[in-house]
């Protein structure tokens, strides 16, 4: 091979090497650009995800969200936001006001011992009853059973006043009512199980769906918002107009359930007779 040909071959080889190095540099630059672009996109995606997460986190949930939900007032209610539950003969001259909280153990004791006496007075037309249902035990002890049960009571009231009364009676019953510290009624399944014991509600698909959907959650919040109405901050409380009626307590001593119920009923009748006069026979 001549020197001239050898020199030309070397020059061609050097040119190929230089060209290959340039192509490699371009590929390296492209890879860096893609990595940077991907990183920026990843940051944007993460930032967007964080922003969405923060936005969702700031949205109200659960019972806070219920405050902003559409208000659905149960049938058979009246007054502002349907928070007046008035049950009884419309011709009855007197109105007894009853304040209760579904989780309240003292309310359960009253309903278990004396509730049927009150229901008989309603049936006899002796007086109407306005029920004001609170949920302060949820606020004091934590949980949401009072509000959830109140929402379910709204679904029962939408069916009929009788369904409301009998469902409330079942919720307070010795068989069903939980300890104050146990938030059983926070579960829809527990509320529906109790409802199946009530003839007016057993197998009622519309009622069941309303409980599951929380149809009356906003109404329950409106009702619970009446806490402190007429200065009442404890349950059970009984009022006639602006007058608080005094129900004598059952003595704290050992006795059978039958003995307890007999005393409790006598005390209630005495309170009612004193305020409204003796029952008509």
Image (cartoon, grey):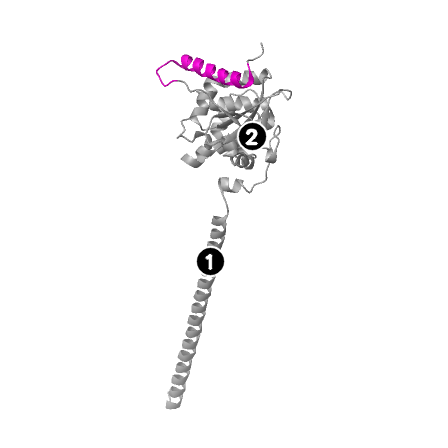
When asked about the image quadrant of residue 257, the answer is: top left
Q: Position of residue 265 (x, y in %)?
A: 47, 15
Q: Quadrant of the N terminus?
A: bottom left
Q: Position of residue 118 (x, y in %)?
A: 53, 18
Above or below, 108 against 136 in this view is above
Between tags 2 and 1, which lies in front? Answer: 2
Say whether residue 153 is visible. yes
Q: Disc 2 designates what residue? A: 154
**Is residue 138 rendered to the left or right of residue 277?**
left
Q: Which residue lies furthest to the left in this view?
A: 254
Badge 2 local density, few (<14 within 10 Å), some, or many (20+)? many
Q: Disc 1 designates what residue? A: 47
Q: Where is residue 184 in the image (x, y as percent from the top left)?
A: 43, 29
* 262 part of magenta stretch: yes
**How far, Cα to Cα, is label 2 from label 1?**
43 Å
Residue range corresponding to the magenta coloring: 251-277
Disc 2 is placed on an element classified as helix
Numbered tag placed on residue 190 in the rendering: none
Badge 1 local density, few (<14 within 10 Å), some, or many (20+)? few
> Residue, x 41% and y 86% (percent of image)?
8
**Is residue 158 rendered to the left or right of residue 57?**
right
Q: In which quarter of the image is the C terminus?
A: top right
Above or below, 41 against 158 in this view is below
Disc 1 is placed on an element classified as helix
């Amino acid at each position: 091979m001549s020197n001239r040909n050898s020199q030309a071959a070397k020059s061609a080889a050097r040119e190929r090497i230089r060209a290959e190095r340039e192509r490699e540099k371009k590929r390296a630059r492209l890879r860096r650009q893609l990595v940077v672009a991907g990183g920026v996109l990843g940051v944007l995606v993460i930032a967007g995800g964080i922003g969405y997460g923060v936005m969702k986190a700031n949205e109200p949930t659960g019972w806070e969200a219920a405050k902003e939900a559409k208000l659905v007032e149960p049938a058979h209610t009246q007054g502002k936001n349907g928070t007046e539950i008035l049950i009884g003969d419309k011709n009855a001259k007197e109105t007894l006001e009853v304040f209760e909280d579904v989780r309240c153990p003292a309310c359960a004791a009253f309903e278990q011992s004396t509730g049927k006496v009150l229901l008989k007075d309603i049936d006899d037309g002796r007086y109407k009853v306005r029920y004001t249902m609170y949920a302060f035990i949820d606020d004091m002890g934590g949980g949401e059973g009072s509000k959830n049960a109140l929402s379910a009571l709204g679904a029962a009231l939408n069916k009929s006043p009788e369904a409301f009364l009998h469902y409330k009676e079942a919720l307070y019953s010795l068989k069903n009512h939980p300890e104050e510290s146990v938030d059983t009624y926070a579960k829809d399944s527990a509320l529906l199980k109790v409802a199946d014991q009530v003839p007016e509600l057993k197998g009622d698909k519309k009622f069941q769906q309303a409980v599951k959907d929380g149809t009356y959650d906003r109404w329950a919040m409106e009702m619970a918002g009446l806490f402190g109405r007429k200065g009442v901050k404890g349950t059970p409380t009984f009022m006639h107009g602006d007058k608080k009626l005094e129900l004598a307590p059952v003595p704290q001593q050992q006795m059978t359930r039958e003995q307890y119920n007999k005393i409790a009923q006598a005390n209630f009748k005495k309170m009612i007779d004193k305020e409204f006069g003796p029952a008509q026979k």
